[in-house]
């Protein structure tokens, strides 16, 4: 099992062009079109177990990957990943059966697995050496298709290859000086599963007794859901969370300041700007 340490960032519609002009990414990227089919049972057994299974078709062959939902906050995740090459288009069920996440499930799950949704996107990839760390920068642009519906993929993934996770936050803040971005919680697998069922399952009422980091994550998830649904109630919920943090006793002045600025920015039509990303990342840094 490999351990993946990654920071996910959602981008504005204009962010990719800004990113491609950034001096940190002056080397030509490697480019590949990636087509991925995600599998689960009709009842969503893998989703319930917080795991995702896919076959990825690449220019050099097919890869089968099983990932677990990891720990972390603010778009930073540390999760288990098992990946191997396969022959043909069918799932390697024998290889799956011996993996710890699958052994924890009922034996009938393997037999019930079926294609659930598809993601297709172009990945532009750079490898940066910065702050004593090696970081893969991946710009993904494309779409998720499920149940006759489609949502766009426009995101940046910073994956730590060597070094400490703090380097991911530092790189994100450097990019945010000019690139409109924000921390994002929902993975492609979570978004596809929600689209497949037309249900966004991560809508538990915010608990005022939750930790500050959990409440900030809840606001980010509301923005993720708003991106895919365009329903104003989710944007309003994010504003409520930030406003409550801005007024909360016991939080640092920095935390309250950044939360208040974010709430005010979300009331503007084109809120996902470079300053919004800067305040979002600064808020995360105050609560880490």
Image (cartoon, helix red, strand yellow):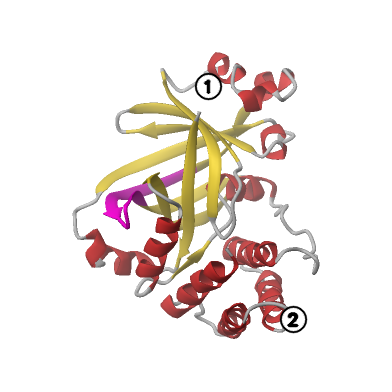
Where is mark 1, residue-wise?
91
Residues shaded magenta: 119-137
Magenta span: chief secondary structure:
strand
What label does residue 116 carry, if any? none
Image-quadrant location for residue 256:
bottom right
Q: Position of residue 230 (x, y in %)?
A: 61, 68
Could you tell me if residue 155 is visible in this image? no
Picture layout, residue 193 above or below residue 141: above
- Is residue 256 found left or right of 10 in the rendered image? right
Q: Position of residue 52 (x, y in %)?
A: 59, 36
Pick the residue in front: 140 or 247. Answer: 247
Picture layout, residue 113 above or below residue 232: above
Q: Secondary structure at mark 1?
A: loop
Pick the residue in front: 166 or 185. Answer: 166
Total numbered labels: 2
Q: Position of residue 137 (x, y in %)?
A: 35, 52
Q: CA distance from mark 2 to mark 1?
A: 52 Å
């Amino acid at each position: 099992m490999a351990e993946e340490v990654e920071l996910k960032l959602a981008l504005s519609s204009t962010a990719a062009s800004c990113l491609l002009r950034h001096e940190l990414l002056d080397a030509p990227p490697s480019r590949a079109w990636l087509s991925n089919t995600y599998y689960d049972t009709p009842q969503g057994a893998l989703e319930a177990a917080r795991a995702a299974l896919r076959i990825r078709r690449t220019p050099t062959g097919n890869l089968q990957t099983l990932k677990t939902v990891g720990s972390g906050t603010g778009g930073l995740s540390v999760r288990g990943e098992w990946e191997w090459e396969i022959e043909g288009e069918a799932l390697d069920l024998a290889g799956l059966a011996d993996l710890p996440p699958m052994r924890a499930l009922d034996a009938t799950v393997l037999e019930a697995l079926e294609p659930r949704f598809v993601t297709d996107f172009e990945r532009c990839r750079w490898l940066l050496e910065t702050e004593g760390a090696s970081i893969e920068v991946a710009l993904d642009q494309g779409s998720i298709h499920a149940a006759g519906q489609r949502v766009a993929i426009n995101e940046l993934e910073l994956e730590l290859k060597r070094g400490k996770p703090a380097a991911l936050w530092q790189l994100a803040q450097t990019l945010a000086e000019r690139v409109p971005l924000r921390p994002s919680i929902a993975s492609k697998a979570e978004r596809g599963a929600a689209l497949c069922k037309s249900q966004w399952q991560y809508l538990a009422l915010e608990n005022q007794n939750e930790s500050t980091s959990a409440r900030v994550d809840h606001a980010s998830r509301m923005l993720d859901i708003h991106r895919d649904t365009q329903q104003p109630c989710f944007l309003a919920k994010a504003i409520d969370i930030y406003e409550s943090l801005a007024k909360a006793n016991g939080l640092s002045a920095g935390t309250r300041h950044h939360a208040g600025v974010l709430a005010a920015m979300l009331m503007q039509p084109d809120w996902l700007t470079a300053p919004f990303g800067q305040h979002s990342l600064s808020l995360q840094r105050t609560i880490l």
